[in-house]
Amino acid sequence: MGSGEMVKRGDGKEGKKAVALKYDAEKDSAPTVSAKGSGAIAEKIIELAREKGIPLREDPDLVSSLMHLDYHQEIPPALYQVVAEILAFAYRMNQEYETGP
């Protein structure tokens, strides 16, 4: 699939949270956590993603699971399917952006 980045956000009652994932099919065996945070840090992650045109996807349950991972840690196999679907979404969004509607 090439490389991809995706930011997941969750706006639960504990406040805003965000996790950024990065995946390069040529180098990585699975997506890794490239940034994560809550509150002001989550806002900054989301702001930077928007500035760079990185797709955002809201999924509070997935964000909660990903927040337990360390930076640069690969996602666990139990999350492969849901993250693959989200990365496919990001890939399609990037393709549409590059080629136009």
Image (spheres, rainbow, N blue to C red):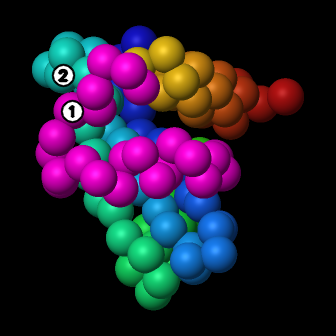
Name the one closer to the observer, 35 or 90: 35
Q: Quadrant of the C terminus?
A: top right
Q: Quadrant of residue 11?
A: bottom right
Give how far across and how far down residue 16 sits, in percent: 56, 74
Residue picked out by circle 2: 28
Contact, mark 2 vs mark 1 (Cβ under 8 Å):
yes
Q: Position of residue 81 (x, y in %)?
A: 49, 16
**Magenta includes 39?**
no
Mark 1 falls on what kind of element?
A: loop
Look at mark 1 in the image and give the residue it sits on.
74
Query: What is the span of residues highlighted in magenta in the rendered image?
Result: 57-79
Q: Is residue 89 left or right of residue 77?
A: right
Q: CA distance from mark 2 to mark 1?
A: 9 Å
Label 2 neighbour load within 10 Å: few <14, some 14-19, many 20+: few
Q: Residue 74: within the magenta?
A: yes
Where does the N terminus fall, quadrant-wise? top left
Vertically, is 100 above or below 65?
above
Q: Secondary structure at mark 2?
A: loop
Q: Is residue 85 left or right of residue 4?
A: right
